[in-house]
Amino acid sequence: MEKAEATSSENMAKKITQAFVLAGGKGERLRPLTNDIPKPLVKVAGEPILQHCIEQLARHEVEEIILGTGHMHEKIEAYFGSGEKFGASIVYSVETEPLGTGGALKQAKGLLDKNFFMLNGDNIADFDFTQMQTEHAENRGLATIALVEVEDVSGYGIARLEGKKIVEFVEKPARKKAPSNLANAGAYIIEKKALEFLPEGFNLIERTMFPALAKKGKLFGFKHKGLWLTTDTLERIRGAEVALKRLK
């Protein structure tokens, strides 16, 4: 018992200082904004979407950020460079062809630490990465997914939980059949060991790694109650702009 408690305390003390951020999207639904720039560089409240994400990670003492890029990656690299002026070291994992969320992560495997944060780079949120890490260590799983309450469950993958354990995601359920109102918020903590559940080539973590971890009882949820803004349509970009201006 004492040995288990010591191991748990050790895991809690070892702060996660690395993140992998998906930033390869074309943003076709955002045209004409994305005619000449990649989606991560579209500005909301005066800053590129991806910059909001990077600065939030830096505030939680994440020291190294790996950007998974592809489409117009040269423009992203030109803007963010080594990351020094944004408070973190930035390195790049460039896709030569679309690999999906899981394929992009698998490609970056050699750059990743024992555990790391992973984010969709097209959301703007104030995730409490510090508390999320605490709960991840307590649960002793292989991955933790940030979950956010949504009104319209029909537009998201909705989690079914047993306690904090995620047992499955139900894709875009009807309101009356939804197991909860908690949707995948696009922020994760992942143990490198979990990458063993990713196949080579194009794949989506939502359909490969996460279901496999759920079956093994190693996938957990973290309820995020703060700011969460999606930016995948022009309407949502405008909504995010208004929301951020209200906070200033």
Image (cartoon, rainbow, N blue to C red):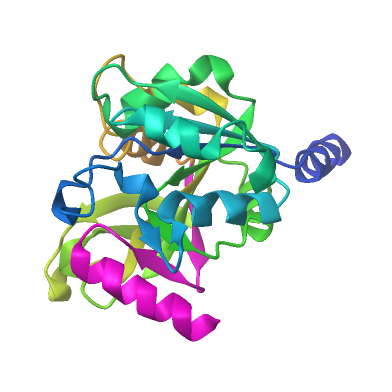
Residue 195, placed above or below residue 167: above
Residue 243, placed above or below residue 220: below
The magenta-colored residue range is 219-248
Quadrant of the image occupied by residue 48: bottom left
Residue 126, placed above or below residue 57: below
In the image, 125 versus 193, the foreground residue is 125
Q: Quadrant of the N terminus?
A: top right
Residue found 46% across the figure and 45% down from its top:
119
Residue found 77% across the figure and 45% down from its top:
12
Q: Is residue 163 in sight in this rendering?
A: no
Residue found 49% across the figure and 46% down from its top:
188
Q: Is residue 35 in sight in this rendering?
A: yes
Is 229 in the magenta? yes
Residue 173 location, x and y as percent? 15, 63
Residue 222 location, x and y as percent? 52, 59
Count the numbered circles shown.
0
Residue 164 location, x and y as percent? 50, 59
Quadrant of the image occupied by residue 115: top right
Relative side of 11 to 121, left or right: right
In the image, 11 versus 68, the foreground residue is 68
Task: Looking at this view, name the residue that lies furthest to the left.
Answer: 174
In the image, 247 versus 230, the foreground residue is 247
Residue found 62% across the figure and 37% down from its top:
83
Q: Quadrant of the C terminus?
A: bottom right
Is 44 in the magenta? no
Residue 157, placed above or below residue 20: below
Task: Looking at this view, name the residue that lies furthest to the bottom.
Answer: 246
Residue 52 location, x and y as percent? 51, 57
Relative side of 45 to 42, left or right: right
